[in-house]
Amino acid sequence: MIARLPKEKKKKRMNEKNHLDHQLIKLAFQHSSDAVALITVEETTFSYEYLNPVAQSIVGFNENIYGKRFEDIYTEQELDLRYPLFRQVVMSCLEVIQDNIYTLISGAVIEKIAITPICVSGKCTHLLVVAKDITELEKQADQITMTGNLVDSILQSTADAIVIGDRHGMIIRTNEKFKEIFGWDEDDLKGTQFGDGPIIPTDRKHEGMKLFSDIKEGKQIRSFRTKRLTKSGESIDVSINYFPIFNGKGDIVGVTAFLRDIRQDLMTKQALKEYEKLLKEMAFNDSLTGLPNRRMLEERFQHELSRAKQNQGKFAVLFLDMDGFKEVNDTLGHDIGDDIIVQFSNLIRGCLRDSDTMARLGGDEFVILLPDIHSLEDIRVIAERMITSANQPIKINGQTVEVSTSIGVSIYPKHGDDLKTLLKLADNALYQAKSAGKNCLYFNS
């Protein structure tokens, strides 16, 4: 008697597991007003294996059509309504959910159709179709009885990790996807607390208990973003959907959690943000110096123009370049020429106020906006500081290069109120500065 006791216990546990599998399926649809259909997939055709009463009333058939091909029971118009979507799910083995409203030939009106493939060894063998019957919202769905293997197929075919707990919050089941993502076997977690188990980081234990408390009150929690621990101790980002399981009396007898690993999604979003930032910088900044380009200059000009008009203020447009840069560039090469442009721009930028804007138009040509100008002397002080700074020798690759700058100035509103005009007049003034001997400042007259 003692020798047979382990076998009896094993048999008892297997019976309890099978009974739990059946109960889980029953609870999944008990007291539901949804229509549920289990469809067998056979090569290129389909047949009903099971229809609950709500589904029977919707499609207008009963058990007599079980096993019959759709081609034998539906018109061509009705087949056109069903086949494209069914075949899409079969080919992809991915669930499809549609919120569209359909009026069937039977007169029934349905919405929120969910088609879930049940795949075994990569092949779709069944489709589980759930639809909301909005013609009789109070009608209760009948129970669906499936074998334990079918329960496993449903659990294992989903892309989400699944954890099932009893009414006390003890974990009783997980699926293979859970092990794949987190590394925990089902036996590792059986009997551990749903809201306080080893997968929940220490600093989030209060969160887990609060969630379980909400579920016990009948709440559904969707797309809850948090972190959970793998068996190796890694903390990963997840999105979780929690659902209570009800019995026929409306009592909560368990809880189900669907966990999705969103690390890749977050990495993709971060990469997109960085790429968008790079595109923005490329659109508004000079690639060599990092200074604003002409496009950014135009935006800054419009901003300063608006401020000046509102405050009846003035601002200056300075056009400058390096004296003799072409000869230096041709002699030393374009790479060194680029380095000189960068160092020159840094020297000039160091002479400006925080409110000033320096932009590179191209080559050695630069434009500077000086807002809040009250007199010519304000401009002269800043410009002469720039000229002095530009006269500093520039050292590159052991060579010393001496450059200088000439500056032309136009002023708003005296010389114009648009960027094109003010740039042209400042360029004319720059030409006058070059003619006067270079390395100097010249105001448009």
Image (spheres, rainbow, N blue to C red):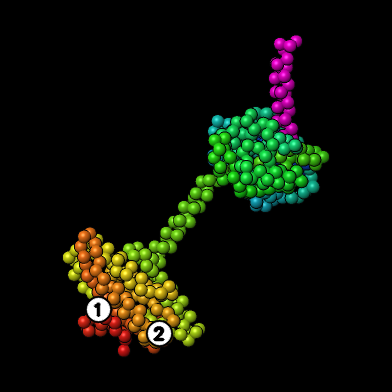
Task: Tell me if residue 23 is in the magenta stretch.
Answer: yes
Kindly tell me whether residue 343 is visible in this rendering: yes
Q: Residue furthest left?
A: 331
Which residues make up the magenta segment? 1-28
**What secondary structure characterizes most of the magenta part?**
helix
Q: Measured from the top left, where is residue 18 in percent x and y?
A: 71, 27
Q: Nearer the viewer, residue 435 or 19?
A: 435
Please state, as top left, top right, bottom left or bottom right, where the C terminus lies in the image. Answer: bottom left
Q: Measured from the top left, where is residue 413 in percent x and y?
A: 41, 86
Q: Is residue 68 left or right of residue 423?
A: right
Which residue appears at 54% of the width and 33% of the height?
Answer: 122
Give the labeled residue for mark 2: 412
Which residue appears at 70% of the width and 46% of the height?
Answer: 210
Above-or-below relation of 355 to 74: below
Residue type pointed to by label 2 = Tyr
Q: Measured from the top left, where is residue 357 in percent x and y?
A: 40, 73
Please state, as top left, top right, bottom left or bottom right, where the N terminus lies in the image. Answer: top right
Q: Is residue 324 left or right of residue 416?
A: left
Image quadrant of residue 12?
A: top right
Give the labeled residue for mark 1: 439
Image quadrant of residue 66?
A: top right
Q: Nearer the viewer, residue 315 or 439?
A: 439
Comparing marks 1 and 2, which lies closer to the viewer?
A: 1
Q: Measured from the top left, where is residue 263 in percent x and y?
A: 53, 45
Question: Mark 1 or mark 2: which comes first in sequence?
Answer: 2
Image quadrant of residue 422?
A: bottom left
Q: Are marks 1 and 2 in contact (CB under 8 Å)?
A: no
Q: Nearer the viewer, residue 290 or 167?
A: 290
Q: CA distance from mark 1 to mark 2?
A: 24 Å
